[in-house]
Image (tube, rainbow, N blue to C red):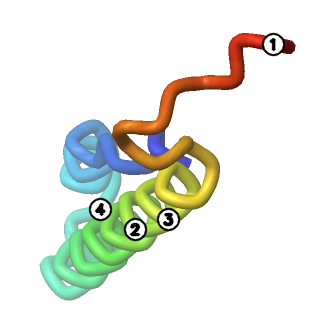
């Protein structure tokens, strides 16, 4: 999920693939929205899977 944050290459490919400015603008909005969603999901996954700060891992395992 965190890999979805990198959107620079997607915008570059959009600029190469399309000539219509309306399609380019729509693509940029979709790419930025997908990056925000991916970043948010990554943050939530890390928040709920990592142990809370200040708690030492169980050394008896």
Label whose residue precedes the other's in the sequence (4 or 3): 4
Q: Quadrant of the C terminus?
A: top right
Q: Quadrant of residue 57?
A: top right
Give how far across and how far down residue 41 sits, in percent.
51, 65
38 to the left or right of 7:
right
Secondary-structure class at tag 3: helix
Front residue (pair 56, 36): 56
Question: Marks 4 and 3, Cα distance to the nearest angstrom?
Answer: 34 Å
Residue found at x 17% / y 79% = 25
Q: Which mark is residue 40?
A: 2
| Vertical position of residue 14 compared to residue 16: above or below | below
Give how far across and how far down residue 50 sits, in percent.
55, 43
Give how far across and how far down residue 2 sits, in percent.
46, 44
| Vertical position of residue 26 compared to residue 52: above or below | below
Q: Residues within 10 Å of mark 4 (few under 14, many from 20)?
A: few
Q: Given contact means CB atoms under 8 Å apart, are the residues at marks 3 and 2 in contact?
A: yes
Q: Residues within 10 Å of mark 3 (few under 14, many from 20)?
A: few
Secondary-structure class at tag 2: helix
Question: Marks 2 and 4, Cα distance to the nearest angstrom?
Answer: 29 Å
Q: Which mark is residue 60?
A: 1
Label whose residue precedes the other's in the sequence (1 or 4): 4
| Vertical position of residue 24 compared to residue 61: above or below | below
Residue found at x 13% / y 78% = 21
Residue mark closest to the camera, 4 vs 3: 3
Label whose residue precedes the other's in the sequence (3 or 1): 3
Q: Given contact means CB atoms under 8 Å apart, are the residues at marks 2 and 4 in contact?
A: no
Residue mark closest to the camera, 3 vs 1: 1
């Amino acid at each position: 999920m965190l890999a979805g944050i990198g959107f620079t290459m997607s915008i570059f490919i959009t600029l190469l693939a399309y000539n219509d400015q309306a399609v380019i603008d729509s693509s940029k909005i979709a790419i930025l929205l997908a990056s925000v969603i991916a970043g948010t999901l990554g943050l939530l996954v890390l928040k709920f899977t990592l142990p809370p700060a200040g708690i030492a891992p169980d050394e008896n395992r």
